[in-house]
Image (cartoon, rainbow, N blue to C red):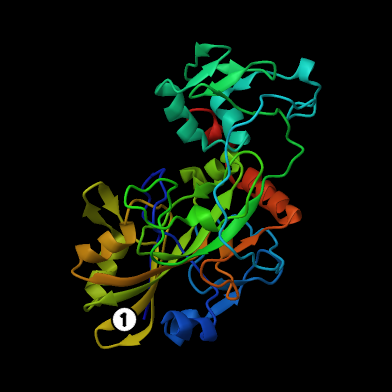
Amino acid sequence: MKTRRTPFRQSRTADSENGPEKAVDRGRSRRDGIPAGAAKTTKASVGGGKETPRGRAPRREVPDAKVAPTKAASGRRPAPRTGGRANRGSVAHDGRPLAEARPERLQKVLAQAGIGSRREMEEWIVAGRISVNGVTATLGQSVVPSDRIKIGGRLVNVRFTSARVPRVVLYHKPEGEIVSRDDPDGRPSVFAALPRIRSGRWIAVGRLDFNTSGLLLFTTSGELANRLMHPSSELVREYAVRVLGELTPEAQQQLLNGVELDDGPASFASIDEAGGEGANRWYRVTLFEGRNREVRRLFEAVGCTVSRLIRIRYGPFTLPPQLKRGRVRELEESEVKALQSALEKSIKPAALRDGA
């Protein structure tokens, strides 16, 4: 049974555990416990022949950046340091000499340098953790390349260069890893599996909770991460879900129409049956936001329990069938440029203004 509706709109900014996935072949389906029916795919319109999951297209889908197969990286490496010497670039990010560089918002410059997402940088500024030329920074403050920026008293490198294309990796997160660098319980971190970088740090595009597996994106650009997570992008998230309990047609329609959760109304954009029998049923669901444990809470609202949750798609990217758990695949420079171009065309500039 396939059920669809016009997606329920609810503006949210955080992407936690919910999102779509795709391209799960029969071999991997059996290995991960997903019924063969949940692994059917169709040709994607983006990327010249990439496989994408069957299901309704998002309201406004960013064209897939061409994703050519590359060798998956293996091995777990320590997370990189974020400090460094400040502002040594000789060219501004708009291509002008430093002397002619225009002032830019502090949070934007730090995000471009890969220190963190723009929203995170805004929080650090408000908390008084950042100073410019020895004075505590203020939200909305502009800086130039000659300014000395410190975070927690440590001078940081915020080169005003845009010639460098940010790095982006796809990671197949296994269950039992946390999307955080610091965990008081000492649980394994996804960041330990990522390639080492000399400056800046990897920024997670959204999150998946400890017991959720599947596709997770990382980038060295806070600006790009902000674009990928911003509500105005309306990027679809798709999940393969194994449910305990009966999901009646009435309950499916209720999940499409919207239910009231603790943090406001929520709904699925589509629900597709994907096989299984008895108490274990598989579904493919899509939505356009990613609140904390949203998929699980939606099913709980109609009396069902999620026993397995796998993200198989995030916007134009699907979980590559050949990418094993705990491995990463880094996008080629041309793929990243195609992604940036697609986002520029699909997201209104006004929606990405500082403070948006």
- Label count reads 1
Nearer the observer, 298 or 138: 138
Q: Quadrant of residue 201?
A: top right
Residue in the foreground of this view, choosing between 169 and 150: 150
- Horizontal side, residue 282 vs residue 345: left or right: left
Residue 342 coordinates in the image, percent (x, y): 66, 50
**Given the image, on which type of amino acid does mark 1 rest?**
Arg
Mark 1 element type: strand
Of the pair 141 and 194, the residue shown nearer to us: 194
* Position of 188 relative to 243 (above/below): above
- From the image, tell me which residue sits under label 1: 281
Badge 1: few (under 14), some or many (20 or more) residues near its Cα, within 10 Å?
Answer: many
Q: Residue furthest bottom?
A: 277
Percent x, y of residue 144: 67, 18
Q: Quadrant of residue 147?
A: top right
Q: Nearer the viewer, residue 21 or 286?
A: 21
Q: Residue at x 51, y 34 (%)?
A: 118
> Is residue 140 shown to the viewer in this render?
no
Q: Is residue 153 above or below residue 93?
A: above
Q: Is residue 234 left or right of residue 98?
A: left
In screen coordinates, is 220 left or right of 275?
Answer: right
Residue at 51%, 74% (x, y): give it: 54
Quadrant where the N terminus lies?
Answer: bottom left
Q: Position of residue 268 (x, y in %)?
A: 35, 62
In the depicted structure, whether residue 266 falls above or below residue 213? above
Residue 79 seen anywhere in this rendered image of the structure: yes
